[in-house]
Image (tube, grey):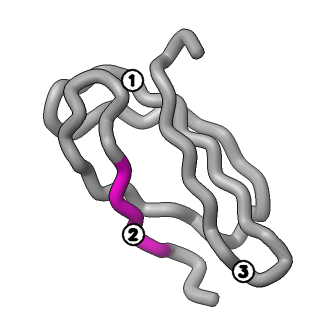
Amino acid sequence: MNELQQHSIDCPYCGEVIEIDIDCSELNQSYIEDCSVCCRPINITVSIDFDNQVHVHATHENE
């Protein structure tokens, strides 16, 4: 699996679809990334299952 993959998510604030890069070298991770459209902070949670499927979840900063 490539260590860096690009994924599309919907910003939980403005609703725009944005592209984010996911570092697939770690199975579970959580971090904050600002929306490239509205600049608000998005909580990004990433998990990779045993079949190397990447699951990305984006929420508001306070969720």
Give the residue number, with chain letter if any, for mark 2.
Answer: 6
Q: State whether residue 9 is above or below residue 1.
A: above
Question: How many numbered circles does the render carry?
Answer: 3
Q: State whether residue 62 is above or below residue 27.
A: above
Identity, as a three-letter code, of the amino acid under mark 2: Gln
Which quarter of the rendering shows the C terminus?
top right
Return the disc, 1 or 3, that comes first in the chain's sequence: 1
Identity, as a three-letter code, of the amino acid under mark 1: Pro
Q: Which residues are magenta?
A: 5-9
At which x and y percent is residue 47? 71, 57
Give the residue number, with chain letter if any, for mark 3.
Answer: 52
Residue 48 lies in quadrant: bottom right
Secondary structure beneath dot 3 equals: loop
Give the residue number, with chain letter if any, for mark 1.
Answer: 41
The residue carrying pointer 1 sits among few (fewer than 14), some (14 to 19) or many (20 or more) residues within 10 Å by Cα, namely some
Magenta stretch holds residue 17? no
At which x and y percent is residue 61? 49, 17
Q: Nearer the viewer, residue 34 or 7?
A: 7
At which x and y percent is residue 42? 43, 29
